[in-house]
Image (cartoon, rainbow, N blue to C red):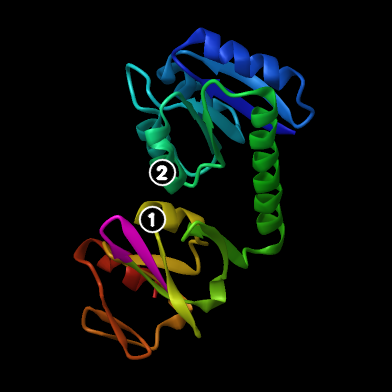
Amino acid sequence: MIRAIAIDDEPPALRIIERFASSSEQLQLLRTFTHPKEALKFLEREMVDLIFLDIQMPSVSGLDLYKSLPKGPMVIFTTAYSEYAVEGFELQAVDYLLKPFTRDRFEKAVEKAQNTLEYQQQIASGGQQFISIRADYSTHRISLTDIRYIEGLDDYLKIHLDNARPIVARLTMKAMVEMLPAGAFMRVHRSYIIPLKRITMVRNKSIYIGEVQIPIGGSYEEAFFKAF
């Protein structure tokens, strides 16, 4: 059972989610909120798997609100404005419901959340082996052991792989770090994430993965050498 809350400044929108959720066997809607600050207080004391989150609210953008949360709840964005869809998926949203949405569309989004939750539980119980990345209108399942290093390019990431072409994805470095196991991967520069086991040499303030030289950023130096 997915434990969920909904945040929207419009009560009618929340009532629709409540009505659809009441007939779902996969979903337990714990609370609804018209004020994001009240929702944040609730999240501090309660475990939640999923947030239905409106994007355009008077006090705060739903996108900014979700970015501020610690890693944890999944999100399904709800909005009447389709132009936010790309940014929503960059934040690894489970789904994006464009208002007004039907019960069938709502149930499909919940099913996606259920599948994601089961996948996360499998990772937690057996150790993470893969990540899924959306790029080139497809979802790529990438083995962690195939990743040589990850390079940030403005609004994109370039994932360098063994024996395969790099995958370029529209994703932030912060979101990428949160997807990777912390003990195995580390951000060492504003533009680089590396797998620690792939390091072949460290010289001065540079890391070498084979022949590739990667700089160590000043703000990451202390944490890197402690881990290394």
Q: Which mark is residue 213?
A: none
Q: Amino acid at mark 1?
A: Arg
Relative image position of residue 164 (x, y in whole percent) = 49, 81
- Secondary structure beneath dot 1 equals loop
Residue closest to the far bottom: 211
Q: Residue at x 76, y 32 (%)?
A: 26
As drawn, the label of residue 86 is 2
Q: Quadrant of the N terminus?
A: top right
The segment highlighted magenta reads 152-161
Q: Which residue is mark 1?
A: 170
Dot 2 and dot 1 residues touching (CB under 8 Å): yes
Packing grade of label 1 (10 A; few <14, some 14-19, many >=20) is many
As shown in the figure, which amino acid type bears the numbered disc 2? Val
Question: Which residue: 51% across, 59% down?
Answer: 133
Can the viewer see residue 110?
Answer: yes
Residue lying furthest top in this view? 11
User: Does residue 168 appear left or right of residue 189 in this picture?
Assistant: right
Q: Quadrant of residue 123?
A: bottom right
Q: Is residue 188 above or below residue 201?
A: above
Q: Is residue 181 magenta?
A: no
In the image, residue 144 above or below residue 213: above
| Residue 136 location (% of width, % of height) | 46, 61
